[in-house]
Amino acid sequence: MEIVTAEEVEQALTDWLGPDGRVEVSRDGPQGRITGWVMHPDFTGVSRATRQSWLWDGFAEEGELQPWAGLRGTFNKRATQIGLMLTYSPSEFENAMGKSA
């Protein structure tokens, strides 16, 4: 199977979230899964389950976020190389990371 890089995942998420989003992903080793987090103001008031659905399965609603195919649609079988991806609103990010979004 072709390897998906952390840079590819980061770029796909950045393209989706646009300039208001923040993305940080990494892979600890060649055989490790890509993990990380994303933050966007439009996640405010949206349940974590819905955010995870958007992240993995896509987003097609009208609004500030761009429509996108999700990690599964974007990377197909290579999406199995992606592990835990956390989603934050700005206030959740500040609480979790201890720094301003």
Image: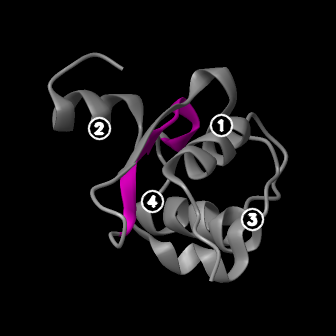
Quadrant of the rendered image containing residue 63? top right
User: In the image, residue 4 lies at what x, y percent?
Assistant: 59, 63
Q: What stretch is highlighted in magenta?
A: 33-43
Depth check, mark 3 against mark 2: the one in front is 3
**Lower position in the chain sequence, tag 1 or tag 2:** 1
Mark 1, residue position: 17
The three-letter code of the residue at mark 1 reads: Leu
The three-letter code of the residue at mark 4 reads: Ser
Q: Is residue 51 above or below residue 11?
A: below
Depth check, mark 4 against mark 2: the one in front is 2
As measured in the structure, the alpha-carbon distance from the residue carrying label 1 to the one carrying label 2 is 17 Å
As measured in the structure, the alpha-carbon distance from the residue carrying label 3 to the one carrying label 4 is 23 Å
User: In the image, residue 83 lies at what x, y percent?
Assistant: 39, 70
User: In the image, residue 17 lies at what x, y percent?
Assistant: 65, 37
User: In the image, residue 18 lies at what x, y percent?
Assistant: 69, 29
Identify the secondary structure beneath mark 3. Answer: helix
Decide: few, some or many residues near mark 3? Use Cα within 10 Å; few <14, some 14-19, many ≥20: some
Residue 8 in sight here = yes
**Lower position in the chain sequence, tag 3 or tag 4:** 4
Mark 3, residue position: 74
Q: Is residue 35 above or below residue 14?
A: below
Q: Which residue sits at x=79%, y=42%?
A: 66
